[in-house]
Image (cartoon, helix red, strand yellow):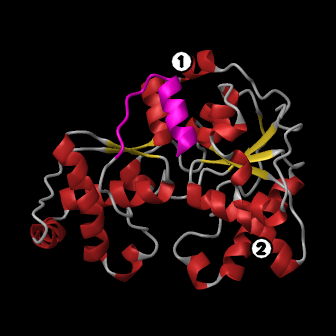
Amino acid sequence: EKATNLVLEDLDMDHLDMVGAPCCPAPGVFGSFDRVTWASIAARNLTIAEQGGHPITTGCNGCFASLWDSNYELKHDEELRIAVNENLAEIGRVFKGNIEVTHYVDALYDTAGLPKIRKRITNPLKGVRMALHPGCHWMRPKLIKQKDESERPHIFRELCEASGAEYVPYKDELICCGAGGAVRTADVKVSLEFTKQKFDSLADAGGADIIVTPCPFCLLQLDLGQVEIEKYFGEKYIFDVLHVTELLALAFGHKPDEFGLGTHLQYMQRKSQPNWERLGIKV
């Protein structure tokens, strides 16, 4: 979140915190159990934005899925909208459907634009091999979201390449991190099998110095998952995992301590630090 704010400020993009917003809520948990409850909680967030007259931009794939999907479904499903508004009436709110929801990646790519982002780079990450994990919920389901090309995405790649790092393609780039759909909650070992498959696929492609994702929950799985895979499977992987905003903050010249890069869970668990030298950072 700190890195997100730093990057927005550097690009002169005005932004407001959503005061009073609860969980998005998690699409794979709430949405799997009760659609009306999921949409009602999401709609409460949407009405906060409607009340202020501002669109919502989020830096999380899961939050984007809940907020964008619920906004879309409530606009197109009258029965759902009636049920949700009955729930919202109990707290004096009503869903009107007059704001839009965007993902942080789209906001940077479409609103700020690559030329402005490239101009802001003061610490190009030359020589850093970078693998990407776009995640599932930003682009899919393609039929209604129409975000980028879900099987051949380029927006996220071009945004990350603006940092100066070298993009490393690998076979399983587009599979799930393993955590989504409440899989991590239900069976962490099963979720880690997905994560391990991604890591092995990346190793087959020659490896990378960093993995970059636009989703904090994917970051958790790819970051802490390295420690958990060693525990469950006895295999050790060491990748520095960054949110896209952390990548850009570094490329914009910010120091890691400004946004807590060294506090990622794998470092806390392993009592280690990011590979500063490999990242071209002097500490």
| Element type where label 1 sits in the image | helix
Can residue 133 be seen?
Answer: yes
Residue 251 location (% of width, % of height): 69, 28
Query: Which image quadrant for residue 270?
Result: bottom right
Indicate which disc residue 101 carries.
Answer: none
Q: Which residue is mark 1?
A: 116
270 vs 151, left or right, is: right
Q: Is residue 226 magenta?
A: no
Mark 2 to mark 1 CA distance (whole Å): 39 Å
220 vs 81, left or right, is: right
Residue 186 location (% of width, % of height): 58, 84
Asked if 225 appears above or below 97 in the picture, the reply is: below
Residue 167 location (% of width, % of height): 75, 37
Residue at 32% across / 71% down in the picture?
38
Question: Crowding at label 2, few (<14), some or many (≥20) Cα neighbours within 10 Å?
Answer: many
User: Which residue occupies the foreground of this view, 120 or 162?
Assistant: 120
Quadrant location of the C terminus in the rendered image: top right
Residue 205 location (% of width, % of height): 86, 50
Q: Amino acid at mark 1?
A: Lys
- Range of magenta residues: 1-17
| Element type where label 2 sits in the image | helix
60 vs 133, left or right, is: left
Q: Which residue is mark 2?
A: 228
